[in-house]
Amino acid sequence: MGILDHWHPVLKSSDVRRKPVAVMIAGQPLAVFRTASGGLGAVADACPHRKLKLSAGTVVGDRLRCAYHGWSYDTAGNGESPGTPKMSACTTSFDIREDHGLIWVKSRGSQATFPDVSMPGYLPICTLIHTIPAPLELTVDNFNEIEHSGTVHATFGYDLDRMHEVSVRFEPTETTVRVVNAGPTKRINRFFGLLLNVRRGDLFHDDWTTHFSPVYSVFDHWWTSPDGSRESMVRWRLYVFFVPIDGRTTRVVSLTYAKSRYPGPAGCLRLVRWLLRRKIDEEVQADVDMLYHLADYDPGIEGLKLSRFDKVLGLTRERIKTIYRGESALPLAAR
Ligand code: FES
Ligand SMILES: [Fe+2]
């Protein structure tokens, strides 16, 4: 399979109303539109006639009409030309679906399975989209190691002065990479600490698994007392999808859920959902800001001085190459 054969989230549902929307995925421009009867379409964003962007057109009934000469296309890409009605003019169309408040697309008819994002017992907190000025691999690297949390992050992560105490375990399978970390938490905002019942010296736990069709990581975050007898009042789960826009830009689509042990409906989380949303947004934005300052955007890792936290970089690269990009595995001698 190639990149476009996997299901990718490309827009929030609320972004697609009566006007078509232009999106880019792996260098492929798409026009996404919603028909008058509520159907969804995604087609290559270039009219087969004279290549006007179809995203500059309008939706008329159940068809997307090109702004230039009025040719129109249905959600399957079947075209009609008002001036030459007998001409067949099809354009490439994509599979499209709406799920978890997002619009997802993949190549028409590919066999990719849709990622499982069901979260029974958790409350949805927010869905965020951030654009990162780095290629896919370098963006995944950032989200898949925790050593940067001592300096970059405010809430989720480890005390820089005690980073050497943080344990890290890797559990790769043929199709996934799991990483399990635990160690002394960094000092977090006082109010947030009270809300979560996290105390100085507690352990932060970070357990995530990365999948490769498409590329996404599922993170579980929580805290315990050093002896494990007390757990924080709130646990988080984040689904983070990595969507390559082109070779230099990656969109990070995150769905955050939380579970609380406080009494009351949804553990009272609805009352503080705005605050949790802000926290997550700040934490992801901190990663975005850091990635602006890389000296080199070459995704290769040869020649880097890697730490004990970085073994994951090679594990994910191998699976991105074979599962996600559909390229052949590295020859044994090169591993
Ligand atoms: S370019 Fe689209 S109808 Fe002519
Ligand atoms: Fe980060």
Image: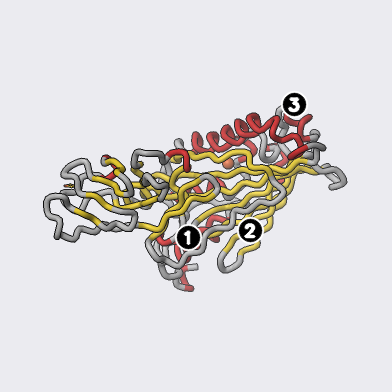
Identify the residue at image location x=55%, y=59%.
211
How many labels, in total? 3
Judge from the rendering whether residue 303 lies leftward or rightward of residue 148; answer left or right. left
The residue that mark 3 highlights is 190
Q: CA distance from mark 3 to mark 2?
A: 31 Å
Judge from the rendering whether residue 168 lies leftward or rightward of residue 173; answer left or right. right
3 or 2: tag closer to the N-terminus: 2
In the image shown, does 137 or 164 lie closer to the viewer? Answer: 137
- SS under mark 2: strand
Q: Residue furthest bottom?
A: 332
Residue 109 locus on image (x, y percent): 40, 66
- SS under mark 1: helix
Identify the residue at image location x=66%, y=33%.
273
Cβ–Cβ under 8 Å for marks 3 and 2? no
The residue that mark 1 highlights is 320
The residue that mark 2 highlights is 178
Q: Residues within 10 Å of mark 3 (few under 14, many from 20)?
A: few
